[in-house]
């Protein structure tokens, strides 16, 4: 353990004898399945319009860590025959986790690459690091500044966490506390997530997971790209692409509940993206299943740190099998999309209101401290390999509108927040979304053993086009309500205003997505890619 920067208040060593806690179920499963080829990292990226004072930031971040002592933990070393992995709460950081990147035109790209390849060690407290990158000119989305206007220096805070210990909402909460300490603003009450109360008995599996046909079938896999299989097998690590898009419009509530939410639109857009990609690669259509984290924790300073989400699976299949061809045609049929949105909303409401084990009862049994951790690890890895064909197609994580102001005083408020989730095989693909300032910040992250950078960019384009379809359906419904009549399914097929040439630019199955062609802009401002090439 090293001492560092005593001016910022870091101690020379961590006092021994801290509180010890056994690994929760999610932490233990992640710990057993770690791989050097695909680091288990979560990255959170906050863009600020101004510059930060290094000493003030270090002090503010340290105070934030002390405010959330559950973050200050490290893994206690032990032998294979011990009964459980154990966290030790240290009370103080082992070293200063804040660093300032060397300036340069590719400083942010290098930091992003480190976030995907270099995991913070579990043996040091805290298992995270915060990199500060100063970026000259442009905007949060990577666009050049206006002509004649001097380019101001912006700041990017890039927080990288080991996912065995922490998740993205925990990282956002730590950064929010850092902003409060740095800017000197009083902590405002943050509303927690609102879940619909379950009415009647617990929902049946057919309601939550989908129809019996979808629940029993193997979910379709994301088709690998056209690289030779030996080349893909040798590829390691993750690729990542970020985009700034318009936030999908909300739908008017009916009887206290909206027919579908922004999250439901993101799930449907992801399923259309996968379906159209697979068709373009010559694969048959199949049932898409999406893993969706559900977080019921409060958002204030009392928020429990760690991996606090439960993972549920949503079957993205229409109740009418004939809708598959309508959804994956040259242009998705809007009436079929409307039906899939309604079905998805019904399933996600049931899943969010239900309660259960984070990874299911089988995982609880495998992680019970009845056998040594070495034997349990062998069993868990074997079960993971055996269950690979039934693993969900894609992970979609949506934190919604960022509930914190992230106000860093003279450095300004955050104008963009991106984050990414791991994309390990056999799933190999994750989509993460957050909205700030009326814009949707989406990150696609993929395993390079599945997709190359060009294929990842094509997939991002398909997601953008699928999200444009959600706009058309939702706006058609809103227009029907504005006319003073109840919307019908026929409204979904009514023509909706599109950007000029949008129909000609639609991506057809079998035709690669053209990254250089302009995409439809369903709302003013359109879509902007965060940077030109994947990380």
Image (cartoon, helix red, strand yellow):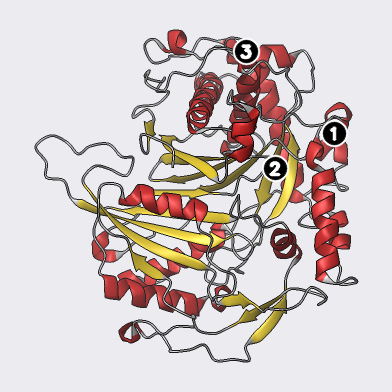
Residue drawn at x 65%, y 29% is 229
Q: What secondary structure is found at the residue carrying circle 3?
A: loop
Spatial separation of the CA atoms under disc 1 and disc 2: 14 Å
Residue 193 location (% of width, % of height)? 60, 55
Residue 356 appears in the rendering: no
Q: What secondary structure is found at the residue carrying circle 1?
A: helix
Where 83 falls versus 383 (above or below)?
Answer: below
Residue 339 location (% of width, % of height)? 70, 22
Residue drawn at x 63%, y 18% is 281
Spatial separation of the CA atoms under disc 1 and disc 3: 24 Å
Residue 110 location (% of width, % of height)? 37, 51
Residue 338 location (% of width, % of height)? 65, 21
Where 26 falls versus 213 (above or below)?
Answer: below
Is the C-beta separation of discs 1 and 3 under 8 Å? no
Label 3 or label 2, whichever comes before in sequence order: 2
Mark 2 neighbour density, 10 Å: few (under 14) some (14–19) many (20 or more): many
Residue drawn at x 56%, y 56% is 41
Is the C-beta separation of discs 1 and 2 under 8 Å? no
Label placed on residue 291: 2
Question: Does 417 sit left or right of 352 as displayed?
Answer: left
Q: Nearer the viewer, residue 194 or 242?
A: 242
Q: What secondary structure is found at the residue carrying circle 2?
A: strand
Spatial separation of the CA atoms under disc 3 and disc 2: 25 Å
Residue at mark 3? 333
Q: Nearer the viewer, mark 3 or mark 2?
A: 2
Label 1 or label 3, whichever comes before in sequence order: 1
Mark 3 neighbour density, 10 Å: few (under 14) some (14–19) many (20 or more): some
| Quadrant housing the C terminus | top left
Residue at mark 1? 215
Mark 1 neighbour density, 10 Å: few (under 14) some (14–19) many (20 or more): some
Question: Does 35 sit left or right of 116 as displayed?
Answer: right
């Amino acid at each position: 353990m090293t001492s560092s920067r005593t001016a910022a208040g870091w101690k020379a060593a961590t006092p021994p004898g801290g509180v010890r806690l056994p690994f929760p179920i999610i932490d233990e499963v992640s710990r057993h399945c770690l791989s050097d080829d695909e680091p288990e990292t979560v990255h959170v990226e906050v863009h600020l319009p101004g510059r930060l004072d290094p000493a003030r930031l270090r002090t503010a971040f340290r105070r934030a860590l002390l405010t959330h002592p559950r973050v200050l933990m490290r893994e206690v070393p032990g032998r294979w025959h011990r009964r459980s992995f154990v966290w030790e709460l240290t009370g103080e950081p082992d070293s200063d986790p804040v660093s300032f990147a060397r300036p340069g035109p590719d400083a942010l790209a290098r930091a992003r690459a480190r976030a995907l390849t270099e995991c913070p060690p579990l043996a040091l407290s805290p298992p995270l690091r915060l990199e500060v990158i100063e970026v000259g000119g442009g905007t949060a989305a990577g666009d050049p500044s206006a002509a004649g206007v001097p380019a101001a220096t912006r700041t990017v805070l890039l927080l990288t966490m080991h996912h065995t210990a922490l998740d993205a909402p925990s990282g956002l909460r730590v950064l929010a506390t850092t902003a409060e300490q740095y800017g000197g603003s009083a902590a405002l009450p943050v509303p927690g997530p609102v879940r619909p109360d379950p009415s009647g008995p617990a929902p049946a599996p057919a309601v939550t997971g989908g129809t019996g046909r979808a629940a029993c079938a193997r979910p379709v896999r994301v088709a690998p790209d056209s690289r030779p299989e030996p080349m893909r097998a040798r590829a390691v690590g993750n690729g990542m692409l970020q985009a700034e898009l318009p936030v999908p419009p909300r739908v008017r509530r009916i009887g206290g509940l909206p027919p579908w939410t922004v999250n439901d639109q993101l799930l449907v857009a992801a399923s259309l993206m996968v379906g159209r990609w697979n068709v373009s690669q010559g694969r048959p259509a199949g049932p898409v299943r999406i893993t969706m984290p559900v977080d019921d924790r409060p958002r204030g300073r009392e928020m429990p740190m760690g991996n606090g989400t439960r993972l549920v699976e949503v079957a993205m299949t229409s109740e009418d099998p004939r809708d598959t061809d309508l959804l994956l045609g040259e242009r998705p049929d809007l009436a079929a999309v409307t039906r899939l949105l309604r079905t998805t909303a019904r399933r996600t409401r049931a899943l969010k209101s239900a309660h259960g084990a984070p990874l299911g009862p089988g995982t609880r049994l495998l992680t019970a401290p009845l056998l040594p951790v070495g034997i349990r690890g062998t069993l868990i890895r074997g079960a993971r390999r055996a269950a690979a064909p039934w693993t969900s197609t894609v992970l979609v994580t949506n934190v919604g509108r960022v509930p914190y102001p992230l106000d860093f005083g003279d450095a300004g408020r955050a104008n963009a927040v991106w984050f990414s989730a791991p994309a390990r095989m056999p799933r190999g693909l994750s989509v993460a979304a957050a909205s700030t300032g009326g814009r949707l910040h989406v990150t696609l992250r993929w395993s390079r053993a599945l997709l190359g950078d060009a294929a990842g960019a094509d997939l991002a384009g398909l997601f953008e086009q699928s999200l444009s379809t959600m706009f058309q359906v939702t706006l058609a419904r809103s227009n029907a309500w504005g006319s003073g009549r109840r919307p019908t399914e026929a409204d979904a097929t009514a023509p909706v205003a599109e950007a000029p040439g949008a129909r000609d630019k639609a991506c057809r199955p079998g035709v690669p997505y053209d990254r250089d062609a302009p995409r439809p802009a369903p709302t003013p401002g359109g879509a902007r890619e965060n940077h030109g090439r994947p990380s």
